[in-house]
Amino acid sequence: MTDELRTLVEQLKALSHPLRLRVLALLEAGEMCVCQVAETLQVPQSSVSEALRELRRAGFVVERKEGRWVFMSVVPKKQVTPLLKGLLAEAGTLPEVQQDRIRAQAVQEIAIPVVCSKVQKGTSADREAARV
């Protein structure tokens, strides 16, 4: 298998999960903190982190660290492949993605430390509930 084919297969695998596709489509609108993504999609931060890890491995997203927070965004426009461009255009038409983007606007109006605190509290509450 050529490197080009292997890369394409890995990219397609990265896009084959609904959460990863929603995360990618959400980031098309702009950079977001990992906590903001988790709050927007109403999923545990660990799930978002795993999705982002796969998307980063496939070359679709980049990260930027600022203090305690990690911000993610779609790769710069000059690095966007035809596959990614077409996928983002198609994903943008999905009702779930449109709802995610509306919710993201509300989440982004809240200070990041507040959002991250809420998400992290939810994560520990989820762990406690799982133990019972």
Image (cartoon, rainbow, N blue to C red):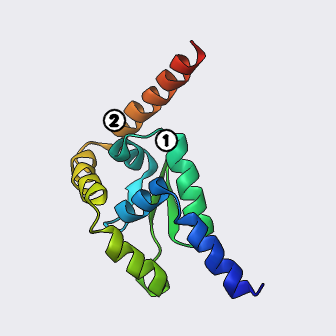
Q: Amino acid at mark 2?
A: Val
Q: Is residue 93 visible?
A: yes
Please tell me which of labels 1 and 2 falls first in the chain: 1
**Residue 15 appears at what percent x and percent y?**
52, 66
Q: Residues within 10 Å of mark 2 (few under 14, many from 20)?
A: few
- State which quadrant residue 131 falls in: top right
Q: Residues within 10 Å of mark 1 (few under 14, many from 20)?
A: many
101, 5: nearer the viewer: 5
Q: How many marks?
A: 2
- Report the disc number at residue 45: 1
**Residue 69 appears at what percent x and percent y?**
47, 48
115, 81: nearer the viewer: 81
Q: Amino acid at mark 1?
A: Gln
Q: Secondary structure at mark 2?
A: helix
Q: Is residue 80 visible?
A: no
> In the rendered view of the protein, which quadrant contains the C terminus?
top right
* Residue placed under numbered mark 2 in the picture: 114
Give the residue displayed 30% in from the left and 59% down from the top. 97
Q: CA distance from mark 1 to mark 2?
A: 15 Å
- In-image side of 118 versus 103 (left or right): right
**Residue 35 appears at what percent x and percent y?**
42, 44
- In-image side of 56 versus 18 (left or right): right
